[in-house]
């Protein structure tokens, strides 16, 4: 049986000392400690992939906390099942005593307890995400119902905006000169100028931004 450890931080600027220190009592060989400087949004990580290739039946994988393994509990469940059921290795999460798949005293195995706890975590995480999306949707709906405008406060385009567009189209002035004349950024003018041309060509029926509203760039 081999003992392995997995350590992860999102960037190289972050410190791994706390995770490494927690592993000291287990005397894990340096060659068996795998470290990724990468986000936990998915499992496409080089060190983690190498670790999976080395894990075999009876081995033990130790991590400091479950979020070091990953951030998405649905993905964590898939990886957890692969390691414990397919590879038949054990997992020990130091910050959560119940997340230990090793055989415990008595009749129940550690895998059964750990699986139940992890599934509860996954359910809670998924429920929180759904509640957050629901609250966001309700907030937007309430704001619209009360007549509140979402996003940046719009301002009216200068009165001679269309005249500048015509002169640009006729090649009399450049878009940069037009923007300077109107007192707006070149990016803003160019974006609105493109909309003006599309409307003139009949590719869009109408656009309120041409009739006055726009957010400063």
Image: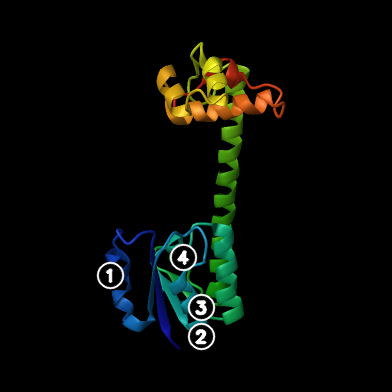
- Most distant residue in the bottom direction: 1
Residue labelled with disc 1: 21
**Quarter occupied by the C terminus:** top left
Q: Quadrant of residue 113?
A: bottom right
- Cα separation between marks 3 and 4: 12 Å
Q: Secondary structure at mark 4?
A: helix
- Quarter residue 68 falls in: bottom left
- Mark closest to the chain's N terminus, 3 or 1: 1
- Residue appearing at x 55%, y 45% in the figure: 128
Q: Which mark is residue 74?
A: none
Q: Please tell me which residue lies in front, 68 or 184.
A: 184
Answer few, some or many: residues within 10 Å of disc 2's Cα (few below 14, many 20 plus, some between 14 and 19).
some
The answer to which of marks 2 and 1 sits earlier in the sequence is 1
Cα separation, mark 2 vs mark 3, equals 13 Å
What is the secondary structure assignment of the residue under circle 2?
loop
- Asked if marks 3 and 4 touch (Cβ < 8 Å), the reply is no
- Regarding residue 103, the answer to whether it shows in the image is no
Q: Which mark is residue 58?
A: 2
Tally of numbered discs: 4
Is 20 on the left or on the right of 205, as rendered?
left
Which one is closest to the eye, mark 2 or mark 3? 3
Q: Secondary structure at mark 1?
A: helix
Give the alpha-carbon distance from disc 2 to disc 4, as whole Å: 20 Å
Which callout, 1 or 4, points to the residue nearer the camera? Answer: 4
Q: Where is mark 3, residue-wise?
A: 52
Q: Which mark is residue 69?
A: 4
Q: CA distance from mark 2 to mark 1?
A: 24 Å
Which numbered mark, 3 or 1, is in the foreground of this view? Answer: 3
């Amino acid at each position: 049986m081999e003992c392995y450890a997995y350590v992860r931080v999102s960037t190289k600027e972050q410190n791994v000392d706390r995770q490494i220190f927690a592993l000291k009592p287990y005397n894990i060989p340096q060659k068996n400690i795998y470290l990724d400087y990468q986000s936990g949004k998915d499992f496409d990580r080089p060190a983690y992939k190498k670790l999976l290739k080395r894990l075999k039946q009876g081995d033990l994988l130790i991590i400091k906390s479950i979020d070091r393994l990953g951030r998405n509990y649905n993905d964590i469940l898939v990886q957890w099942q692969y390691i414990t059921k397919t590879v038949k290795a054990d997992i020990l999460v130091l910050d959560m005593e119940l997340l230990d798949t090793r055989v415990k005293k008595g009749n129940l195995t550690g895998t059964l307890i750990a699986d139940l706890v992890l599934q509860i975590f996954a359910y809670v995480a998924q429920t929180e995400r759904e509640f957050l999306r629901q609250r966001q949707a309700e907030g937007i709906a309430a704001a619209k119902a009360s007549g509140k405008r979402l996003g940046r406060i719009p301002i009216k385009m200068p009165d001679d905006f269309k005249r500048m567009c015509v002169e640009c189209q006729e090649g009399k002035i450049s878009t940069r000169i037009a923007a300077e004349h109107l007192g707006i950024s070149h990016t803003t003018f160019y974006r609105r100028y493109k909309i003006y041309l599309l409307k003139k060509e009949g590719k869009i029926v109408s656009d309120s931004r041409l009739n006055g509203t726009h957010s400063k760039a």
